[in-house]
Amino acid sequence: MVKSLLIVTASVLTNGLLVRLLSSDASVSSVTSVRNTDEALHTLKQQQPTMIVADIARHSEHALAALATLKAAAPRSRIAVLIDEADAIVQRKCFNLGASWVFDKSTEFERLIDLVHNKS
């Protein structure tokens, strides 16, 4: 059951869309959004969300390392990754770093929304 969400994205557009779509679910108690890993770590010191939605850049090793950092800071939180071009290699890397789900941002965005609504 999803009770609280933490959204980590630098994209204003993605952030606005996720907050609007996910906070509309009555069974989601809170949606917090931050712009980067540092803000996420600060937030995770104060609250441990049920789910973290991390929008990461495909070609950034720093972004992939941030995924491991988020998992270490919130070991009980499930992490859903939004990434461009989520091929099998990138998906495997994300799963190995702690992701529970990996969604291609351009083709599977709605699957993420459905996941949250169905887990609620």
Image (spheres, rainbow, N blue to C red):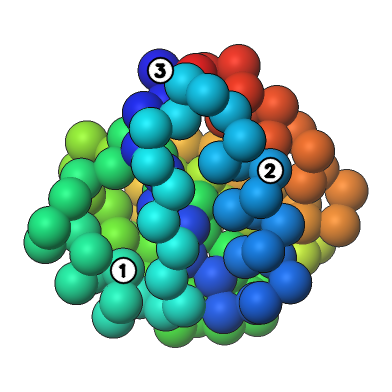
At label 1, the amino acid type is: Ala
Q: Marks 2 and 1, Cα distance to the nearest angstrom?
A: 20 Å
Q: Where is residue 18 in the image (x, y as percent from the top left)?
A: 65, 53
Q: Can residue 83 be seen in this view?
A: no
Residue 43, image quadrant: bottom left
Task: Decide which of 87, 119 is in the foreground and name it.
Answer: 119
Q: Where is residue 74 in the image (x, y as percent from the top left)?
A: 21, 49
* Residue 3 versus residue 11 in the image, above or below: above
Q: Earlier in the sequence, mark 1 or mark 3?
A: 3
Hey, which residue is sitting farthest left in the picture?
A: 45
Q: Position of residue 66 (x, y in %)?
A: 37, 71
Picture disc at residue 1 = 3
At label 3, the amino acid type is: Met
At label 2, the amino acid type is: Leu
Q: In this view, does 87 lie to the left or right of 56?
A: right
Q: Is mark 2 on a helix, strand or loop?
A: helix
Picture disc at residue 21 = 2
Residue plotted at (68% across, 43% down): 21
- Say if mark 1 contacts mark 3, CB within 8 Å: no
The residue to which callout 1 is attached is: 40
